[in-house]
Amino acid sequence: MSKDRLITPSYCYILTANFLLYFGFYLLMPVLPFFLTEVLHTEHAVMGMALSCYTIAALMIRPFSGYLLDTFARKPLYLLAYFLFATVFAGYMIAGTLTLFIVLRVIHGFAFGTVTVSGNTVVIDIMPSSRRGEGLGYYGLANNTAMSVGPMVGLFMHDAGVSFNSLFLAALASCALGWIFASLVHAPVKAPVKRQPISLDRFILLKGIPAGIALLMLSIPYGMTTTYVAMYAKQIGILSGTGLFFTLMAVGMAVSRIFSGKQVDKGRIVTVISLGIYLVCVCFFLLASCQWAMHHFPHLGRYLFFGIAFLLGVGFGTMFPAFNTLFVNLAPHNQRGTATSTYLTSWDVGIGAGLLIGGYIGQVSTFNHAYLFGACLCVVSALFFRLKVGPHFEKNRLR
């Protein structure tokens, strides 16, 4: 068997486990607000807090999970976090009070923050380094596919009158099956390492901070898009078919995997990321202009709106595996978990900021101004990446 072979049984198992984990996660994402209002009778102001504590918990645990993965055996931690993540779905079935729901959301956030970092780290361990960009591209594609299919299935089940307990059970079944596939992965045994004194660089990849800043600025408009683009569409007069936006975005991400991962494996990490940033810069300026286009040329504006979705998918799909590889290539082998944690933390912080900033701008003005602000952030990120991040990476890369 070639040592450069990417498609192995273990790789297929972890791809499947990753898809099933994210499918269970995204299956419930659009229906939890209905659960809070219809079952727990939660007010809208409190509902936002109850849902966001999940993200806060995930952000808090990521740096520590990276440290644990670099210190102890990775697969057992991955399976433990996966098991805890799946089990919480059963807890939702008995959550009769808002307080218990919030406690479960916090536990779920801790488990999600750990299982995503550990999954990313294990998949890096089992793939050949010469095909890391391509391998991470397909791994990310499993997330994107679940992101496209999960919410659609969840909303369909809810609209069809399926009970919330049945939805929680479906998510539990998906993740339980995913855990079985995860347990079949044959990860290399990690050699014992000398315990390093606890310091900041054991929790955050210090060499990855410049790249993290560039990624954070890009993830702010991404967070605005995933959360508010349906409201923006309604605001500018596109009243139906907004679900197609996310489907086209997922298709664009899938298409980008055809070429981006292989280019990363050829060492063109900086070039691939730069091209992706340039594309999303253009897309967000065009997205902000859709309000003007819909006012003057409605048919053209509608085609532009959905065309942007596909191109955004291509742009972000190009950058995701390249950024992940960039962080890993800045870290020694015994800090892969820390590198992955820093990458995901930068992304999540930007997503959270995008939710807050986009909501505020949308409330005091219009969402096209939010996307114009996002486009300007992308330009700043492009300049920062070209002038600081790219040269810093070429100087400090380890592989």
Image: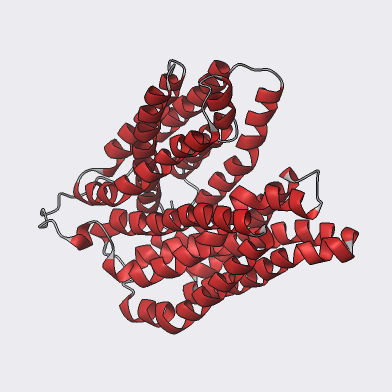
* Residue located 53% across and 39% down the image: 19
| Residue 371: quadrant of the picture | bottom right
Quadrant of image for the C terminus: bottom left
Residue 102: percent from left, percent from top: 39, 30
| In the rendered image, the vertical position of residue 67 relative to residue 328, given as above or below | above
Residue 303: percent from left, percent from top: 83, 59
Q: Across the whole image, how many numbered discs are drawn on residues?
A: 0
Q: Is residue 348 left or right of residue 41?
A: left
Residue 250: percent from left, percent from top: 65, 50
Q: Which residue is at the front of the view, 213 or 6?
A: 213
* Residue located 70% across and 65% down the image: 288
Q: Which residue is at the front of the view, 309 or 83?
A: 309
Which residue extends farthest front? Answer: 364
Q: How is the image coloured?
A: secondary structure
| In the rendered image, the vertical position of residue 304 relative to residue 123, given as above or below | below
Residue 75: percent from left, percent from top: 30, 40
* Residue located 40% across and 59% down the image: 346
Q: Is residue 131 left or right of residue 23?
A: left
Q: Is residue 117 left or right of residue 42?
A: left
Q: Which residue is at the front of the view, 7 or 359?
A: 359
Residue 183 visible within the image: no
* Residue located 67% across and 53% down the image: 249
Residue 90 visible within the image: yes
Q: Which residue is at the front of the view, 350 or 14?
A: 350
